[in-house]
Amino acid sequence: MDRLITGIITPVIMKFKIEKQFIIALLHLPGIKRKTAYKLLVNLDRDILSLGELIEYLSDKGDIKLKSTLSIDDFDNALKVAWQILQQSATYNIKMVSVLDDDYPKLLRQSNDPPVILNYIGDITLLGSKPTIAIIGTRDPSPYGERYAKFVSDFFVGKGFNIVSGLAKGCDTAAHLGAIAANGVTSAVLAHGLDKVYPKENKALADQIKQCGVLVSEYFIGTQMSKKNFIERDRIQAGLSLGTFIVECTIGSGTMHTAKYTKDYERVLAVMKPPLRDYNETRVSGNQMLSQTGKAVAICDNYELKNLSIVLLSNQAN
């Protein structure tokens, strides 16, 4: 299990005050994308409590190139959008935490591409106060895979972990349900605004997660899901977690995006070793490829699960 051990470097975040409205506005200015906004925020060298201070700050940041010249109308429009988002979010009890806030999840901040803002419903501190593992996989698992997802979730709840997944059908749902059945904590990362739940049949499950964990999304209220959003969501699942456990997945599935991000972030990647009868099944082709190429550790028994938990907890301590 030595190959599971990894090192993590924490970036230094300067502590200056900036109102949430101005952070949201920053993300809605022409030519300023997520990564540029992140650079502007982590290099913050002053308090920004007014529109004038925001304009002055952007004018001074010549070392961070903007794609377009910004006008007063651009700032006014961005601030109006930001105000609407804050007002609408409040009606759904959606709160926000920025990368500059103490409650922002530490592991996510350490990733290569953290969201500037996380929208959430529930207890965001649970993503920092407990060790985390992402348990994910196909939307169409075998009966064995569905049972195993619940079993692994139950196992890690017993070790004190917060179970992170994506609220999708199949393995994600099983992982969340396994955590709830074990009276544990579970967190769901969504690929759209938190005013909606997808799939609709998981509305009751989402309501349960709000009570025993947290729903999170980098997308503001009203944002519709898209293929691009799901891929970007996958980086957050990996970023929030000490490691990722894949139950079942095909080589071409979306789960492989999370696997890639997990490796990019130098986190632990593990997969379920399928039973012999399923070795040649397409639904576990991703498991086989990841384990056979040495990108993931294949887990087949409780002893290996225990070792995995020990390594993850050791990485958290480091």
Image (cartoon, rainbow, N blue to C red):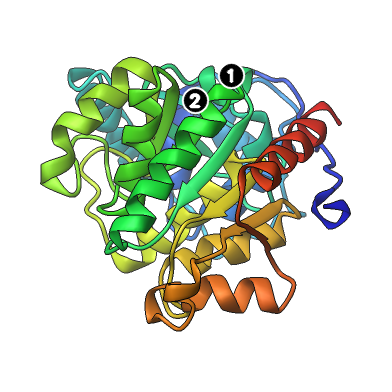
Q: Residue at x 31, y 63 (%)?
A: 142
Q: Residue at x 67, y 36 (%)?
A: 107
The Cα–Cα distance between marks 2 and 1, rounded to whole angstroms, is 7 Å
User: Which is more toward the observer, 69 or 9?
Assistant: 9
The residue under label 1 is: 103
Q: Amino acid at mark 1?
A: Asp
Q: Residue 167's spot in the image, x, y percent?
A: 31, 44
User: What SS does tag 1 mark?
Assistant: loop
Residue 71 lies left or right of residue 244; in this view the side is left
The tag on residue 288 is: none
User: What SS does tag 2 mark?
Assistant: strand
Q: Residue at x 52, y 26 (%)?
A: 157
The residue under label 2 is: 97
Q: Residue 18's spot in the image, x, y percent?
A: 57, 22
Marks 2 and 1 close (CB-CB < 8 Å): yes
Is 252 above or below relative to 266? below
- Looking at this rendering, what residue extends furthest in the left direction? 201
User: Which is more toward the observer, 134 or 47?
Assistant: 134
